[in-house]
Image: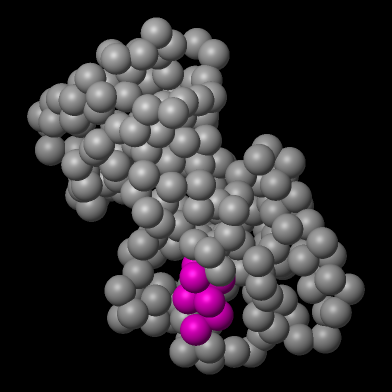
């Protein structure tokens, strides 16, 4: 799982990154709110650890914009211990949890794990796009009433596209999320995988939902 850590104190960010990596997370970092909003909006993260006090946009502003844009990525806020109003504001804006400073990395890891487990057990278990329905737990895929059988890789590819329907997912993002590579090997295996997915998801049905975004990647649209 990939986590974005948004923290402007370099030493704290490095400590969090090292601690999360020790527990198996892939970690990206940035130090200001404007960059955090851009990256969380454009890239695929399983969770965001977001400090409230940041240069540029503050953490609450970043969180508010993400939720207004329909971005449901889990967000764990880092707050000053005495800032109860900010913690309440963060939860009301859609934060999944908060952690007051100072804290131990072990507590952060535990809270992050709890947030991710809760997300997997919520309504986000089932994703929709038009007549396409995907159950992330049972792995059942339906187009209308028709069941579609996918390989594990095809399922991961479809689920990745479904997390932000209507928005383009770049080939690099797909490579990172589905195949776990941190670089583009320069082959067309992503395009080949999407072609195979189309044969099952689109070709047997009159309405096509997997769209090619030229020069970018792919997107799902309920009404192309």
In which image quadrant can residue 201 be found?
top left
Image position, residue 13 (x, y; %): 49, 73
Give whichever of 70, 141 is nearer the camera. 141
Is any part of residue 109 visible from this angle?
Answer: yes
Is any part of residue 36 visible from this angle?
Answer: no
Image position, residue 121 (x, y; %): 53, 64
Here the colouring is: one colour
Magenta region, mostly helix, strand or loop? helix
Q: Is residue 182 above or below residue 59?
A: above
In magenta, the rendered stretch is 110-117
Residue at point 36%, 44% (across, down): 140
Is residue 111 one of those drawn in magenta? yes
Left or right: 39 with respect to 19? right
Image position, residue 152 (x, y; %): 22, 47
Residue furthest right as drawn: 85
Image position, residue 183 (x, y; %): 21, 44
In which image quadrant can residue 171 be found?
top left
Residue at point 52%, 20% (across, down): 222
């Amino acid at each position: 799982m990939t986590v974005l850590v948004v923290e402007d104190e370099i030493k704290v960010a490095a400590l969090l990154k090292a601690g999360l990596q020790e527990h198996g997370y892939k970690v990206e970092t940035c130090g200001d709110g404007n960059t955090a909003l851009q990256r969380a909006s454009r890239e695929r993260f399983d969770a965001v650890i977001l400090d409230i006090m940041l240069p540029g946009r503050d953490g609450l502003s970043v969180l508010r914009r993400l939720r207004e844009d329909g971005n449901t990525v889990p967000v764990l806020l880092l707050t000053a211990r005495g800032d109860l109003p900010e913690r309440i504001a963060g939860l009301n804006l859609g934060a999944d949890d908060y952690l007051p400073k100072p804290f131990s990395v072990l507590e952060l890891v535990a809270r992050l794990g709890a947030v991710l487990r809760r997300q997997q057990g919520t309504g986000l278990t089932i994703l929709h796009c038009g007549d396409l329905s995907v159950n992330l737990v049972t792995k059942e895929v339906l187009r209308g009433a028709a069941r579609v059988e996918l390989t594990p890789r095809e399922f991961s590819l479809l689920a990745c596209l479904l997390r932000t329907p209507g928005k383009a997912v770049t080939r690099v993002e797909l490579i990172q999320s589905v195949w776990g590579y941190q670089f583009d090997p320069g082959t067309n295996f992503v395009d080949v995988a999407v072609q195979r997915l189309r044969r099952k998801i689109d070709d047997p049905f009159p309405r096509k939902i997997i769209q090619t975004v030229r020069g970018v990647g792919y997107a799902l649209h309920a009404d192309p």
